[in-house]
């Protein structure tokens, strides 16, 4: 049996920190990446697609999001698709999944009831509320004589030994495996993660935050026979890349190196970049860096400065360039002598103004 395992689509994700236009473009991409996975599913002739929760970012999504989801799901054609509710779209009475017009091949599993599929059985473990106190997989029965391939689908944290019994949606992975499941398709963690050779998180198909580790994949899972260890292949499906980059400046020439690094980024219109900048530069290098950042703030889907701690150490050349005229020269001397943290900013601004004016 071949399965495509995905999760955490978070459709309708708000992305409030982005401009309206960019946020809309990235929201649309989350549907397009579903279509890309439908192609992948057909290419690899999978028997089944499982989506392990958080199909929607929340239950309040509008009709536009529901319709786009329905249209994207339709592209799987005849391949059966199983959806379960996660903590973002739990099976409450107002659930987005219950409002979804599901195409004939799609099954929304809001009940803990086994679903027969060709070659085996899927055991969905939906969340009925955002935080379940009990393990959502606790209900799973042990293997019975003569059963085919058994697949469980669940959404929550796979922590073997937790000190806190209060952690919601906690899944005891070894217990599930011990009940004779061939594969446990997990959702919740947004990066690819192997909790056990038989229990994987696929991660989100498109990243949702800068902090995620290895998001943007789908898993192709092949299970030869009941009891056989699954073969799991990670396939990159995301269009957007969310990068974090730290840069410490000790030397002005590093601004040009940093420019070369930015220039080498592939498909910059689909790249989101979070920067942490530290160190020290001359006034002129700092102005060059600012101009570079302004340029890239427009080119990239997003450029966010998580930290901007580059201090300015004016060189003699910087100051001579500034001190050309009497009034400016005096101001420069005052700012250099000043101890207020804003003095550095003022010098930088002054330098930039003079450069632009010149
Ligand atoms: Mn999620």
Image (tube, helix red, strand yellow):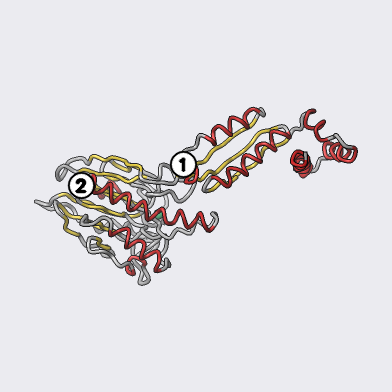
Percent position (x, y) of residue 252?
A: 67, 29
| Residue drawn at 30 percent across, 45 percent down | 219
Between discs 1 and 2, the one toward the N terminus? 2
Q: Which residue is mark 2?
A: 45
Percent position (x, y) of residue 182?
A: 21, 46
Q: Which residue is mark 1?
A: 267
| Residue drawn at 54 percent across, 48 percent down | 302
The residue sitting at the right extreme is 326
Q: Secondary structure at mark 1?
A: loop
Q: Secondary structure at mark 2?
A: loop
Q: Which is more toward the observer, 32 or 129?
A: 32
Q: Residues within 10 Å of mark 2 (few under 14, many from 20)?
A: some
- Residue 23 visible in the displayed image: yes
The residue sitting at the front extreme is 358
- Residue 341 visible in the displayed image: no
Quadrant position of the C terminus in the picture? top right
């Amino acid at each position: 049996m071949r399965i495509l395992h995905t999760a955490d689509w978070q459709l309708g994700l708000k992305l409030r920190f982005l401009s309206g236009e960019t946020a809309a473009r990235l929201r649309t991409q989350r549907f397009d990446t579903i279509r890309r996975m439908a192609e992948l599913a057909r290419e690899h002739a999978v028997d089944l697609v499982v989506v392990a929760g958080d199909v929607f970012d929340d239950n309040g999504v509008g009709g536009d999001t529901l319709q786009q989801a329905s249209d994207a799901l339709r592209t799987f054609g005849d391949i059966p698709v199983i959806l379960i509710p996660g903590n973002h779209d739990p099976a409450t009475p107002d659930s987005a999944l219950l409002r979804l017009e599901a195409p004939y091949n799609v099954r929304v599993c809001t009940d803990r009831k086994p679903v027969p599929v060709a070659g085996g059985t899927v055991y969905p473990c939906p969340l009925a509320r955002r935080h379940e106190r009990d393990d959502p997989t606790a209900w799973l029965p042990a293997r019975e004589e003569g059963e085919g391939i058994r697949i469980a689908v669940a959404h929550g944290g796979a922590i073997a030994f937790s000190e806190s019994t209060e952690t919601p949606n906690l899944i005891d992975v070894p217990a599930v495996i011990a009940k004779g499941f061939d594969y446990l398709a997990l959702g919740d963690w947004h990066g690819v993660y192997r909790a056990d050779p038989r229990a994987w998180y696929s991660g989100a198909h498109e990243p949702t935050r800068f902090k995620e580790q290895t998001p943007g994949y789908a898993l192709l899972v092949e299970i030869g026979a009941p009891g056989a260890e699954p073969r799991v292949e990670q396939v990159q499906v995301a269009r957007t890349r969310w990068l974090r980059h730290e840069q410490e400046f000790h030397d002005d020439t590093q601004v040009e190196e940093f420019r070369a690094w930015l220039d080498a980024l592939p498909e910059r219109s689909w790249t989101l970049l979070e920067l942490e900048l530290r160190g020290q530069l001359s006034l002129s290098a700092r102005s060059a860096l600012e101009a570079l950042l302004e340029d890239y703030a427009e080119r990239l889907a997003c450029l966010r400065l998580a930290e901007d701690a580059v201090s300015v150490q004016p060189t003699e050349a910087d100051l001579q360039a500034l001190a050309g005229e009497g009034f400016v020269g005096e101001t420069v001397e005052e700012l250099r002598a000043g101890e207020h943290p804003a003095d550095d900013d003022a010098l930088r601004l002054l330098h930039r103004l003079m450069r632009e004016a010149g």
